[in-house]
Image (cartoon, rainbow, N blue to C red):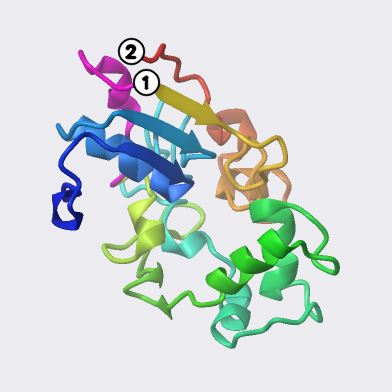
Amino acid sequence: MAKPNPIGVDHPPHLVGWSTGGGAIARFVIEGHTAASLTLIDPVAPYGFGGANPDGTPWYDDYAGSGAGMVNPTFLEHLAAGDRSTDSPFSPRNVMAPTFWGGDPLAPSEQSTTLFEESMTTWIDENNVPGDVESSNNWPGYAPGTRGILNALSPKYLHWNEIVELETKPPIMWTHGALDAVVSDNSTWDAAVLGAGVWWRIGPGRTSARHNRWSLRSEPG
């Protein structure tokens, strides 16, 4: 991760990261850069998203169950087509409102409308969202590729649990919204939860691979 100096920042910045951004700013500090503070807003979990046990160990050696394959392809088709309706359960407005920021998709607030319109600019491609997918002999049949943002969130590539071991670290505020349905022990974007609910047949399920990453504890300082 590059330092912010090219944009004229010559002192330790206060960094705020939402979701993926939370993991990014944590890695910024872990990799030796200095920050005045970190504010983590519903950050991706310290061991990445999907495909891993609560202690961060992967379900399988190829990290099957995480990466670009975890997104519903029909939703991606609607997103790529610029669907702004509420006609389909896979319409982005119906998917994003209850999972990403809450609220009624039929009665959006000004803020949620702004977030939605920004989301609709997403570039759908194997090099961006969702990324490329590798086939796997392990459940649920896919593993992370090497390109794209959702592969970057796989525990194969992302981990920031080391932040608690830093000798010197900035003040950290970690917030988590009570209605967050993505970064959650019951995230319906997680193959383990879908497997446990028999929406995605026969997998590790929550008894052995629950998306519970909230055991990481640290005092800022």
The kind of secondary structure element at disc 2 is: loop
Instruction: Indicate the quadrant containing the C terminus: top left, top right, bottom left or bottom right.
Output: top left
Classed neighbour count for the residue bearing mark 2: other residues with Cα under 10 Å, few (<14), some (14–19), many (≥20): few
The kind of secondary structure element at disc 1 is: loop
Q: Residue at x 46, y 42 (%)?
A: 44
Q: Residue at x 62, y 38 (%)?
A: 184
Classed neighbour count for the residue bearing mark 1: other residues with Cα under 10 Å, few (<14), some (14–19), many (≥20): some
Marks 1/2: CA–CA distance: 5 Å
Q: Are marks 1 and 2 in contact (CB under 8 Å)?
A: yes
Horizontal and vertical percent position of residue 158? 32, 43
Horizontal and vertical percent position of residue 88? 78, 78
Whether residue 60 appears in this view of the structure is no
Work out whether residue 47 or residue 66 is closer to the camera in this orientation and state it. Answer: 47
Residue that mark 1 sits on: 171
- Residue found farthest to the bottom: 81
Q: Main secondary structure of the magenta part?
A: loop
Instruction: Look at label 2 and name its amino acid.
Output: Gly
Residue interval drawn in magenta: 157-171
The reply to whether the magenta stretch includes residue 181 is no
Residue that mark 2 sits on: 221
- Answer above or below: position of 56 versus 67: above
Q: Quadrant of residue 72?
A: bottom right
- Answer above or below: position of 204 versus 54: below
